Amino acid sequence: MDFTDYFPVWGKLTPIQQKRILGAVMTRTVKKGTVIHNGSMDCTGLLLVKSGQLRAFILSEEGREITIYRLFDRDMCLFSASCMLRSIQFDVTIEAEKDTELWVIPAEVYQGIMEESAPVANYTNELMAARFSDVMWLIEQIMWKSLDKRVAAFLLEESAIEGSRELKLTHEAIANHLGSHREVITRMLRYFQSEGLVRLSRGRITILDEKKLEALQE
Amino acid sequence: MDFTDYFPVWGKLTPIQQKRILGAVMTRTVKKGTVIHNGSMDCTGLLLVKSGQLRAFILSEEGREITIYRLFDRDMCLFSASCMLRSIQFDVTIEAEKDTELWVIPAEVYQGIMEESAPVANYTNELMAARFSDVMWLIEQIMWKSLDKRVAAFLLEESAIEGSRELKLTHEAIANHLGSHREVITRMLRYFQSEGLVRLSRGRITILDEKKLEALQE
């Protein structure tokens, strides 16, 4: 599989536009834990994931984190190219959650094509709308859901992504996803353990009762 | 001033597109308090504010509210036409905060033009990016800022919008903007009053010490 199979609306580009992108796109392989983009960097470019997993999050002045969305195979990240749209007034950090292969499309190349191509502009719209929906979901979670439900939902999501009930996850990592504190997450997980929902061991959480976790998250 | 002066990128439409919009646009005048759009409604259409003030908010199942952005003269609202973009997976309610004059552009007309016109699609992108920035700002507020700072910032924002230090605002209304409870807001405002920042009277809050409020919000 090639870049042209991964790039959305490829068939709706003119041959000149296709050539312009192919001449500018770069491949990158990053190790788990690498920060690919952070708010203070220059415009990194659009990221198109070939394989792996990325996490976009925001940081508070005190260094607290909260995950705003994740990117998997074939997903494209706009906000690492926020210089492209002057109305984007916020910074995200993008980190590899797994070893990841990706393509980087320079922002000015994509922007040039977007400005002249209605299909690319409309695709960009759909992309932003999808991320917007993620963020609205997050606001609803933060505002109306208690932390026990959010932790339950996060463990189930992780289990689905990994295809395993045994999760290699520190309490710190969960806190950083959910915008909470490690101590608070530890307390919650111990409560889950006492209820027979999970088993905790060093750097590892094993889901024991998926049904009860599912009931809890609602 | 006419619709064509308010509609963005008007000059970049073809004569046929201009005619299509002019043949479909409707004017509407709504009283303060009117709900113009709510999540469960069909696609209301794009709203373009001529004069007045609108508020977009989300609702919890229990009826709690939180304001996600506000619209003033010349602002356009996309999310009242969310059927246009299939990736929009959330519902907002739009309410008039003041008597408002607006234009309604049917979603299918705008969508048809957006699909063929790169300038309209790119304008829509900027619009969505601006709202996205509002929502990211909101997440940062909710996550990292204490409620006293948020109430102080809200009172100062209201004062700037109204051009007055005397605000006609119930505690309930503030709670609905900030996603809080009336009782919590009342307690906070009484504390502000005891510190000499505001004076409270029936349905009214008077800002006494703008400087101290500004210092508090940071």
Image: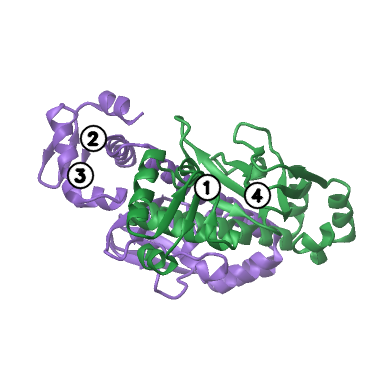
Chain colours: A purple, B green
Mark 1 vs mark 3, foreground winner is: 1
Mark 1 vs mark 2, foreground winner is: 1
Relative side of B122 to A217, left or right: right
Q: Residue at x 40, y 63 (%)?
A: B213
Q: Measure how far apart labels 4 and 1 are at the Cα level.
A: 28 Å
Instruction: Bin the neighbour count of mark 3 within 10 Å (Cα to Cα): few under 14, some 14-19, many 20 and up.
Output: many
Identify the subunit bearing mark 3.
A
Instruction: Bin the neighbour count of mark 2 within 10 Å (Cα to Cα): few under 14, some 14-19, many 20 and up.
Output: some
Relative side of B165 to A62, left or right: right
Mark 2 vs mark 3, foreground winner is: 3
Q: Residue at x 78, y 52 (%)?
A: B113
Q: Position of residue A105 (x, y in %)?
A: 51, 68
Q: Amino acid at mark 4?
A: Leu
Badge 2 or badge 3: first in the primary sequence: 2
Q: Which mark is residue B78?
A: 4
Q: Which mark is residue B169?
A: 1
Identify the subunit bearing mark 2.
A
Q: Measure how far apart labels 4 and 3 are at the Cα level.
A: 38 Å
Q: Position of residue B103 (x, y in %)?
A: 77, 49
Rendered position, A162 above or below B20? above
Q: Position of residue B44 (x, y in %)?
A: 70, 39
Tag 3 residue: A185
Which SS class for mark 1?
A: loop
Q: Amino acid at mark 1?
A: Leu
